[in-house]
Image (spheres, rainbow, N blue to C red):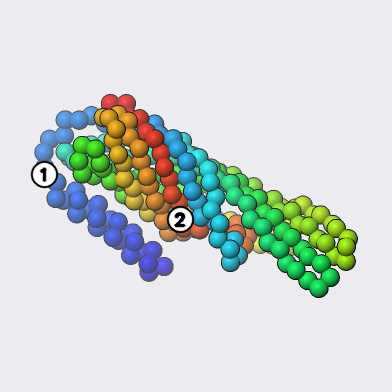
Amino acid sequence: MRIHKLILALLFATCTTLFAQEEKTDVKTKSYFGLKAGFNIIKLTEHDDKTFSFGFQVGSTLTIPMSKRFSFQPEILLQTASGESKYVNTFSNGTIEQESKTKIALLLFPLNFKYIISKKVDIDLGPTIGLVLDRNEKIIETQNIDGVITVYEFTPQANPYIKNRETTVALAANLGTNYNFTEKVYLGFRYSLFISEFQNIDNTLDNSLFAFSLGYNFK
């Protein structure tokens, strides 16, 4: 928890420092909207095994210039991801294999501050509030005991003996960079570190999200 608080403190201090160093000039550029879409990679942690889940993102941005190089950029992003994991337990009289398939949809609200380094490159950093819109998990268990094969299919959410610990709201810290092909078209990369985790039973959406996107600004 101390590390999480330190990350938020450093994020706030960095944004404050960058803005304080800017010259107080009149901002003549108007605010403008934008669209972005791409794909993402989310690190999934399930038990002691860590896998990566792939999905896509789509959303809109609003850029509000605050100085010559500094802007505030809130966003609304829909992120989806799906992943699979498999476990095999071997016994003297057979095996038990479990295959888990997870699909999740997240609604993210990044509140980033953008700093222009050059005409082609800028960086953005800030917090994100995330909401779980939907999560579906299916487990297929195949038992091969003494030559007899039995297949079970169930969802952990439907098990009354498992306490559901799902967290529907989470907080993340973002750090990203954009390369501007033109004044309107750019390619972006962003890394998000989740301060609080999305949890569901004994499966956890870990704290790493990598996003690659192509954006267009309506200037």
Q: Are marks 1 and 2 in contact (CB under 8 Å)?
A: no
- Residue 12: x, y in percent? 28, 56
Residue at x 38%, y 47% (from the top left corner): 190
* Amino acid bearing label 2: Ser
**Residue 180 position within the rendered picture, expressed as x and y whole percent measured from the top left:** 28, 35
Q: Residue at x 41, y 39 (%)?
A: 213
Residue holding disc 2: 208
Q: How many numbered circles are shown? A: 2
In the depicted structure, whether residue 158 falls above or below residue 147: above
Camera-side mark, 1 or 2: 2
Q: In this orientation, which residue lies closer to the viewer: 142 or 25?
A: 142
Q: Is residue 76 left or right of residue 104?
A: left
Q: Quadrant of the N terminus?
A: bottom left
Q: Which mark is residue 23?
A: 1
Camera-nearest residue between 168 and 175: 175
146 shown above or below 81: below
Mark 2 residue element: strand
Q: Quadrant of residue 163?
A: bottom right
Mark 1 or mark 2, which has the lower sequence index? Answer: 1
- Secondary element at tag 1: loop
> Between marks 1 and 2, how big is the CA–CA gap?
35 Å
